[in-house]
Image (cartoon, rainbow, N blue to C red):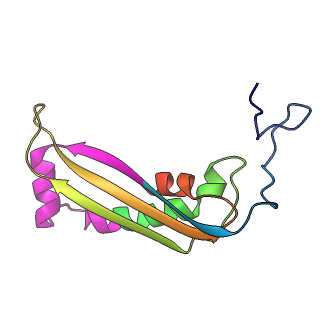
Amino acid sequence: MAEFTHFNESGRARMVDVSAKAQTERVATAQAKVYLQPETLEKIQRGKIAKGDVLAVAQVAGVMGAKKTPELIPMCHPIFLSSIDISFKEEPQPDRDGRCSITVTATAKTSGQTGVEKESKNAV
């Protein structure tokens, strides 16, 4: 039977002990696709959204989200993030449902004893 690493012998939640793990370079990439109406994508591309540059704000929010991961996810180790890179790929051609999309890709990096998968997911 598999052992659950986030529970102690009494069945109570705990933060996993990573002290015996070697410090290695760790990289994780996550993607999300945001669907929107063609008119909305066009407004974003032309800078016509009243509240400003949507993708610039999303990029800053993504970096902040990655940095706040241990505050948002219980038992998550606070780690030093050496890099967070977020990019956007616009797909202006509507799909069969008439929606365009923007693919958000976030890559998080660290050199440490635990991975950055949750941080890259939070960034997107």
**Residue drawn at (68%, 52%) of the image:** 76
Q: Is residue 73 left or right of residue 28?
A: right
The part of the chain drawn in magenta is 30-57
Residue 55 covered by magenta stretch:
yes
Q: Quick one: 11 or 99, which is closer to the camera?
A: 11
Quarter of the figure with residue 99: top left
Query: Exactly how many numbered labels are in the figure?
Result: 0
What residue sits 54% from the left and 57% below the top? 119
Q: Is residue 24 above or below residue 73?
A: below
Along the line of sight, which residue is nearer the eye, 74 or 23? 23
Depicted 43 relative to depicted 75: above or below: below
Quadrant that contains the N terminus: top right
Tell me the residue at 15%/43% (across/down). 37
Q: Please tell me which residue lies in front, 122 or 23.
A: 23
Q: x, y (%) of residue 41?
A: 15, 53
Estimate the x, y position of residue 89 in percent, counting from the top left. Answer: 22, 58
Residue drawn at (70%, 63%), measured in percent from left and top? 113
Where is residue 49 shown, x and y percent of the image? 19, 60
Residue at the far right: name it: 10
Q: Quadrant of the C terminus?
A: bottom left
**Residue 52 in sight here:** no
| Residue 8 horizontal side relative to residue 104, left or right | right
Query: Would residue 108 be found to the left or right of residue 104 on screen?
Result: right
Asked where in the image residue 70 lies, by quadrant, the reply is bottom right
Task: Classify residue 72 as left or right of residue 39.
Answer: right
| Residue 60 is covered by the magenta coloring | no
Quarter of the rendering containing residue 80: bottom right
From the top left corner, tell me how far across and down residue 55 is, in percent.
Answer: 28, 64
**Residue 18 in view of the camera:** yes
